[in-house]
Image (cartoon, helix red, strand yellow):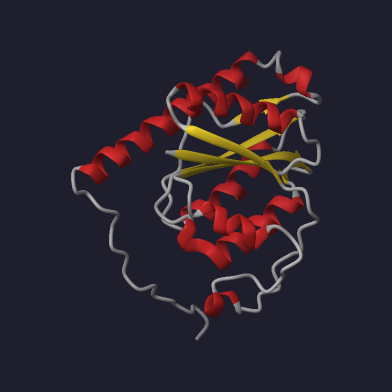
Amino acid sequence: MKVLLVNSSPHKEGCTYRALFEVSKTLNEQGIETEIIQIKDPIKDCMGCGACKKTGECVIKDDMVNDFVKKAKNFDGFIFGSPVYYAHPSGRLLSFMDRIFYSGSSAFAHKPAAAVVSARRAGTSASLDAITKHFTINNMPVISSNYWNMVHGNKSEEVESDLEGLQIMRTLGLNMAWILKCIEAGRKSGIEKPQIEKKIWTNFIR
């Protein structure tokens, strides 16, 4: 079992990375493989062209979106991390997630996921909500902790003082490992993922 963690902060080993690292360490202790990747490239916004519905790939080829979707097919769970800017996640993460979910939703469906955010002070719950909406529209179990998945600090060293925040990350790791093991045990017992009905689209404008 493997979990892919995404750091959308421009700071490679900043506060968001510190939170993700704590989750990763706990997952490793539970026998779960992990990989933390950073969104390095400038990420272009979704154009809403709809071409990916036919090809399964985003038509924008000059960033890491398509490669990430291919990679995601080999992972069992996901954690997306972001700093909080103006009470919302980083713009690069939102553009990234919009495009990977539009073009590669099948790589993520029915796999557990969680959002993690870091902030100096406020805006965390709104940011968690924005990220988590990508999961709940795509049949993904959402993993929780013993509080909202956040750490506080302006620098990674300050996150070390957020003892509650680091505990939240460890608890998140334990819960993710537990759900993954439950899914694996269910699969071995013959319990398959649900067969989803064809999507019904309702237009409220008459």
Identity of the residue drawn at 70% across and 58% down: 95
Q: Position of residue 25 (x, y in %)?
A: 56, 23
Identity of the residue drawn at 60% across and 24% down: 22
From the viewer's perspective, is residue 78 above or below residue 54?
above
From the viewer's perspective, is residue 2 above or below residue 56?
above
Give left or right: position of 118 versus 191.
Answer: right
Q: Position of residue 153 (x, y in %)?
A: 76, 24
Q: Which image quarter: residue 116?
A: top right
Identity of the residue drawn at 43% across and 51% down: 140
- Foreground of the two, 28 or 197: 28
Q: How many marks?
A: 0
Q: Say whether residue 146 is visible.
A: no
Q: Position of residue 62 (x, y in %)?
A: 76, 65
Residue furthest out toward the left: 189
Q: Position of residue 79 (x, y in %)?
A: 56, 40
Identity of the residue drawn at 66% across and 60% down: 65
- Foreground of the two, 184 or 98: 184
Give left or right: position of 77 versus 158.
Answer: left
Give left or right: position of 62 versus 67.
Answer: right
- Foreground of the two, 180 or 33: 33
Image quarter where the N terminus lies is: top left
